[in-house]
Image (tube, helix red, strand yellow):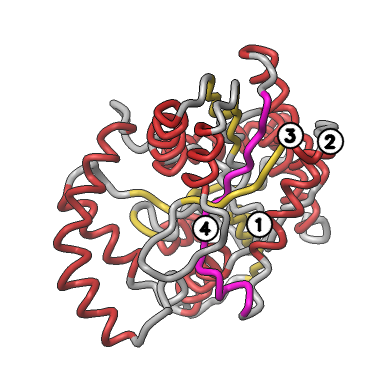
Amino acid sequence: MLGILLSNLGTPDAPTPKALRKYLKEFLWDPRVFDGIPRWVWWFILNGVVLRTRPEKSAKLYKKIWTENGSPLLLTTYDQAQKLKQHYHQANKKNISIRVGMRYGHPGIPFALDQLKKDGCEKILLLPLYPQYCSATTATTWDAFTSALSRSKNVLESRMVMRYYDHPQYIQAVVDSIKEEWSRSGKTEKLLFSFHGVPMRFSREGDPYESECRVTAKNVAEALSLSHDEWRISFQSRFGREEWLQPYTSDVIREFGRDELESLSVVCPGFSVDCLETLEEMEEENKDIFLQAGGKQFTYISCLNARDDHIRLMATLVDAHTQDWM
């Protein structure tokens, strides 16, 4: 039996300060996520300042996007897993088990691994749903995965999909999602590619994330036949006082608004699922920045989520990494 573990960043259990405090403590204490200052200094800042103030603010934001059934990110990831399972059943490949394990929060990676073992899986492919490799996302997922494996007496044979930022199917899926939105609301004057930010020193220390983001944006723009002045790239969601990758999304959007841009589309191809950073920060907060600065029409283009072409891409990645196992 082959096991597929779909993984994403994670989500709090509820849009409450208590749930956010627990989630943020796990997330922000990860040394791959926050390594800019000595650990003992960060411990005092995290527990003495951040976890006393940020949970309440974050809970208010999560309440804006929370659904009756729970977290949009978790629900969509379950939907992706179900559709991928259906894909293999239709292909008469039923000796595959697919489970969801988040890096932070529930259900966690150790829980997903236990499920796969109970399903009788002997080989496991870890598929982190991050198109661009980053030490703060892909690498820390691998850390958690191998740590969970190491606690077993029988360590299962395992592999991981490292990246797919320039995979033709991924690029085409993003292109098609943009074209479909433009067919509904009209092509806009500018297209902004907004990726999640990381500290600028990551690039200096060898993390390929920034360069992979730029390749993704360039490939999509070329596939759309956009001229150089019809698109830009930016980075969102910075945290703390350290300098992060630039230009910052909010600054670029404000600039577009001040130029009284007639219409702007924003796509976030680094996110495989719509979440707080896209549904609240982008679709609401940055839209307000654009309109208040003088812009006219703002269009947010949804993530690939559980689109059929996204599921086919996942299947292609799984097949490519498990061909000899199959």
Helix, strand or loop at mark 2? helix
Do the residues bearing badges 2 and 1 touch, measured as CB atoms within 8 Å? no
Mark 3: few/some/many CA within 10 Å (<14, 14-19, 20+): some
Between marks 1 and 3 in the image, the one whose residue lies nearer the viewer: 3
In the rendered structure, find residue 230 and report the number of the disc placed on it: 3
Work out whether mark 3 precedes mark 2 in sequence or the reverse, and give the earlier one.
Answer: 2
In the rendered structure, find residue 223 and report the number of the disc placed on it: 2
Q: Amino acid at mark 3?
A: Glu
Q: Which residue is mark 1?
A: 132
Helix, strand or loop at mark 3? helix
User: Does any portion of residue 109 appear in the rendered image?
Assistant: yes
Compared across the picture, whether 115 is left or right of 171 comes to left
Q: Which residue is mark 4?
A: 197
| Residue 197 drawn at (x, y percent) | 52, 58
Residue at the location (21% across, 48% down)? 57
| Residue 3 drawn at (x, y percent) | 61, 55
Work out whether mark 4 precedes mark 3 in sequence or the reverse, and give the earlier one.
Answer: 4
